[in-house]
Amino acid sequence: MRRNTFLFSLFVLVFVSGLFVPATRAATSVQVLILPFSIHAEQDLSYLKTEIPDHIRVYLEQSGAMVVDQTPGAMVDATALSVSAIRQMGLQTGARYIIWGSMTRIGNGISLDIRMVETTGDDPVMAIFEAGSGMESLRHLINESVRKLSRRLFSQELVAGIRITGNQRIETDAIERVLRVKVGDLLRADDIANDVKNIHKIGYFDDVQVTSQDTPEGEIITFQVTEKPTIRRISFSGNQVFDTEKLRENLSIKTGSILNVFTIKSNIDQLESLYKDKNYHNVSITYAVTEQDNNQADIKFSIEEGDKVKITQITFQGNQTFTDKELLKLIKTSERGFWSWLTSSGELNREDLNQDAGRIMAKYHTSGFIYAKVADPVVTFLENSIHVAFKIEEGERFRVGQIDVDGDLIVSRDILMAGLSIAKEPYFNREQVRQDIVLLTDIYADAGYAYVSINPVTKEHPDTHLVDITYSIDKGEQVFFEDIEIVGNTRTRDNVIRRELRIYEQHLYSGSRLKRSVRNLNRLDYFEDVKVDTPKGSADNLMKVKVEVKEKPTGAFTFGAGYSTEDKMFFAGSIAQRNLFGKGLILRLGGQIGASSDLYNVSLTDPWLFDIPLSGSAGLYRQKREYDTYDRTSRGGSVSLSYPIWDYTRASVTYRFDVTDVDDVDYDASDNIKSLTGNTTTSSITLGLAYDSRDKTFNTTSGQNHRIAYTYAGVGGNVEYNKVIAELGWYIPVYKDLVSFIHGETGFIQKNGGEILPDYEKFYLGGMNSIRGFDFQDIHIPTVNSEGYPSEEGGLSYAQFNFELTYPIVKDLGIVGVIFYDTGNVYEDKTVDLTDLRQSAGYGIRWYSPVGPIRIEAGHILDPKDDESSSPKWEFSMGTAF
């Protein structure tokens, strides 16, 4: 079916030596003398006297002619000589043909007049005249002229036509596009041979043959091609790890495509990479081609997958300062362990491995080893395991020497030096140097120097192993914002975006304000992407700002079901629009129906009331909840205002009006609860102060969340009390992705006068969102009602502390594990006794799933009482935020 390289080479040799031998022999016997050309032009183009002959010489010599050297007499102006004198000059040099001529330029017009005569005989002079426009056309005119000369010199034929035959699937145009030979060209053997190679390079043909046909107009060249077969079917055998469909997806060849051996081999490499990514490094893949009728073929890939191979040994060579254990903790690649069947430990990932070398290098460079080198890791594949070796050259360790700042100082040297972290490092640390550059850049950027340049100049002292560092500062010019352009907002109004910006036109540049502006726009959650470009303005000290946003849907309709140990099974639905009419208004309507509680609410919020950062909201609600000893139904509404007083900090005031019905009171309810039977009306005002810098509200990894609220009830109604609640929370990254959460809250409530203080306003603890391991409201004040039945009431004060450690189990899916310790209690009066605290500890899993946040946690009571168990209490919630 396919010709090998030898047959192709033999064909070309036969073609060149047979079809074109007469012309070649004729060419080698032709000797030509080329005389200098006459140049007629207003400009000085005298260099063309010899350049034109040189170009003709090159072309003729490539065609096989012998160009003889000129005699001193041949340097004359040939156009002034007679034909007989020119012939005599040729006889003196032994040339058979003599070529001369002239070039004329008038304006932009170019003309070339070339003459050629045979030195013997009486044949007339051959004259060729070509004309063009512009000097760039001269080379083309020379080529056209020489082609005509060559036909006379070598008795060569012109290519009168080109034909393509034998192609059934490949278009003729596709073949003709790779041919160098064109109709009208001189027929040259090397051009034909190159075109045969070009056709083969397409990759679609097994064989290419060339024939020629003489005609009065010249030679008609025919390229007879034999197409490679097409692929009829692709099959696999031996594949267990990947199904056939997955393997097909990773092939570039498809049924119906041209069979190409090189493409098949590259596809095998691709399949092997697929297996090796899954740690089947001993995979072997071969293929077989079976010919079918109608120039078709079937391909079968035979796969020997082998066993899964993992890393069993990681070694370090040359590490003197850091132990193998310390370096292993740095890198992502790990050895196969007991849980490797469940985790990714021991898997070979080339990208991770290369990054590991960088991590080791960074460790040394941040520890004083400024000349440390880490070679590319060496991977050795054994039959059933993989060994990885890192080779390290530590070099000498350098401490920090003298530190200085120079150049353009906008504040005192001492102020700039005070913030440099490198001064606190015992050893030279490149990361700290980078952070110092960022610090200095931010200082200057906030003073308007947008293009400040900080260059750390280091001077090593090998004898003392010290490195001096000087931060050289070129502040440049102060820059002002010229104008701010907003694009891409198809629905959100310009003013909604502009009010989030902390930069203003004609104001001095500020790097921190620019970053805060981008953060504010992202926190709106109106846009898929926010890009800020800062090109130079109309002057060097002006900067344009282009804010480009990409809108995303801000409305949502949700419906779902969930379960929690507090509310049991529930169904919930909501409609929300976070950017109503593109004005940034927030409208929410929601409802929840559960086994122990029902809730319906509607609210409208304007984050920028009166076009100032004053958030105003109003809402209505209705809630029914079943407690252990009574049922409570509440209806009411609220209006609130909040204002940002500092970064991340908002002050708020809320008025709430609530009417509550208490019914279905059990015999063992407390006297307080029994006294609430019927209607109670609460009219209250709450003053609040909140600080929230969390990066996200669920599975938070950094930031703080603090609040304090004071509520006064008694602005009308029959309920009157004072309540204070304070809460502190810190999310602290510990190591890599390990995050700690420290949380504490406390509060107290006090009845005013002789009015009612409802039990449901008092404090209870226990349950998933307070002290885990205890049932909902399990931590309370035990009492005995007037009928002698044991009952329970809420406390007048409480304290609660939570300590958590979270770590991602499956990071890409947002699944994290958690261990926790909770402690707290409620008290009969306003005094909090920290020596009397209930305690629990446990563990769990959290997942921000597509249906909402899911928590599964088990808590153990550490100080169980007689009627309590220390066995784990599992709690589960889905669809409600923590």
Image: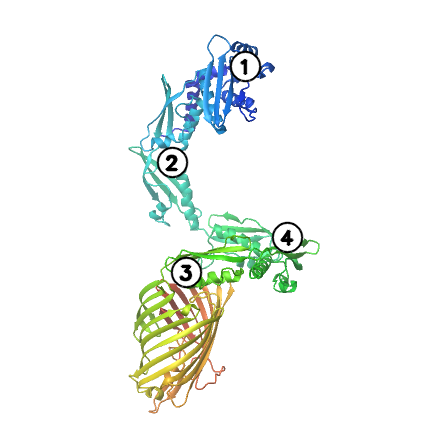
Mark 3 falls on what kind of element?
Answer: helix
The residue wearing badge 1 is: 80
Report how far apart the C-alphas of labels 3 and 2 lie in the structure.
57 Å
The residue wearing badge 3 is: 494
**Mark number displayed over residue 260:** 2
Mark 1 falls on what kind of element?
Answer: helix
Report how far apart the C-alphas of labels 3 and 1 lie in the structure.
82 Å
Mark 4 surroundings: few (<14), some (14-19) or many (≥20) residues within 10 A: some
The residue wearing badge 4 is: 395
Mark 2 surroundings: few (<14), some (14-19) or many (≥20) residues within 10 A: some
Instruction: Locate residue 218 relative to residue 649 in the image: left or right.
Output: left
User: Dots 4 and 3: beta carbons under 8 Å?
Assistant: no
Mark 3 surroundings: few (<14), some (14-19) or many (≥20) residues within 10 A: some
Does 378 sit above or below residue 712? above
Instruction: Locate residue 713 relative to residue 32 in the image: left or right.
Output: left
The answer to whether any part of residue 515 appears in the image is: yes
Circle nearer the viewer, 4 or 3: 3
Q: Residue 459, located in which quarter of the rendered image?
A: bottom right
